[in-house]
Structure formats: structure tokens, C-alpha cells
Image (tube, helix red, strand yellow):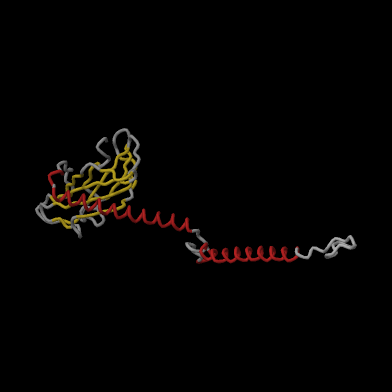
Amino acid sequence: MRNTGLAVNLDNKTPPPSAAPSITSRRVNNAHHRAGSHEQSQSEDEPHTNEGRDVRSGVTLESSELATSTITTKRRFNRSINLQREAQKALREALASPTRFNRWSTPKHGLSIAALAPVDLYATRRLTVVAAKNVTPSGLRVVAGSPEIDLQTLNDAGQVVQVRSIARLHREASTIDGAIPAGATIYYVVIYETPVLDAAQRVRLSIAQIKAADQPASTDVSGADQ
């Protein structure tokens, strides 16, 4: 008697893997879909990688470089503003307390000057306030751009053998045109680069009037420890 039912593997041949292609195809399609999604995400992100870049003149700057440049510029700008503020503050204090100027130089062509001890603002910045007094019975005018600051080198006899100008970074004045009426006093605030001095060197500040520009009144502003 024959068993009823379907014949299975009657010819002993392995049936073809009919379900495998569809599974493989589905996996390939899914992988392709994921790859496509990943590529789309990259293309959307790529425009953002250009933000913060300067491509003018064929030069590309990363955002970090631009940020560093901006910070440096801001620091320089703020430092410049601070110098002006410190100078104006020192000038107001000088005008309010003129008796602090009590060490006057020997008059030169009617002009005598006195300076306060220099103040260090930064490691490389120094501020000095100087007063210029007209000791004559008539008005005079100081040389434009005054005062001058020089680094002088002395020999063993105390004579000046070398003079080098010190860079002046900022200046404030109590007068616009440098005119000093008879018996009056004007004030200057100068900020300059702090010099490194040898034992035989000193810093001199000088102011001259226009009728004797080659013979200015001067004073030592090397510092309190000099």
C-alpha cells in the first residue's frame, strides 16, 4: 500500500535555493539604502565645513585660525584703548594735584620741567607724567611732538657717548598747540616701551621751546631705583 501525500526528493536531487536570492537582494538593497543615506548626510554636512573659511585670493583659513586672528586683533585693540584710558586718567590726576611736581630741572631758555616716577603698566609698557613750566615773563611755545624720550649711554666720566630714541606709544597733553603763557604750566603723559638698561645707561625726557630747539630742558626718568 502506498503512502498518501506529496513526494519529497524522489530523484535525490537537492532543491534549488529559491528563497535565498530574495533575501540577498533585500539585504543588498538595504545596504545600498544605508550607503545612500550616509552619502546624503555627508553632502549635507560638507557645506558646513566651509563655514569660517576665507577663500579670497585662493587662501583658505580654518575657523580656528580666524578665531585666533580675531582674538589677537581684539587684544591689540583693547590694549590700545587701555593705554589711552590710563594716560587720560594720569593727566587728570596731574591737573588735580600739581604740587606733586616738586623736582624742577634747571631752566633752559625759560623752560623748566619736572617728572613723576614712572609707572609700569605692562611688562613692556611704562607711563611717565611730566610738567613743563614757563618761568619767563612772556609766553613761549614748545616744539611740536614734545616730549622726547632717549636712552643715553655714559662713559666712566659721566659724559654722554651714545643716544638712542625710545619708541613712544601714546601721548596726552593738557594743551593742543604747546603754548605756555607766562608763569603757567602744562602737562604731558607719555607711554613708551620699557627699556632694558645697562649700568651706564639712563632714560632722559626732554622738552624744548621753538626758539631753542637744540637746547631742551631735560630730566632723568630711568626709575626710582636709578
Horizontal side of 6 relative to 63 (left or right) equals: right
Q: Nearer the viewer, residue 168 or 123?
A: 123
Horizontal side of 45 relative to 7 (left or right) equals: left
All told, the count of numbered labels is 0
Specify the quadrant that holds the C terminus: top left
Can you tell which quarter of the image residue 76 is in? bottom left
Q: Position of residue 12 (x, y in %)?
A: 89, 60
Q: Position of residue 177 (x, y in %)?
A: 20, 60
- Is residue 155 shown above or below 146? above
Q: Position of residue 208 (x, y in %)?
A: 22, 51
Horizontal side of 37 relative to 211 (left or right) equals: right
Residue at (23% x, 43% y) in the render: 219
The residue positioned farthest toward the left in the image shown: 137
Residue at (53% x, 66% y) in the render: 47
The residue positioned farthest toward the top in the image shown: 156
Q: Nearer the viewer, residue 8 or 215?
A: 8
Residue at (28% x, 49% y) in the render: 191
Q: Position of residue 218 (x, y in %)?
A: 23, 45
Can you tell which quarter of the image residue 211 is in? bottom left
Residue at (20% x, 44% y) in the render: 115
- Is residue 118 shown above or below 23? above
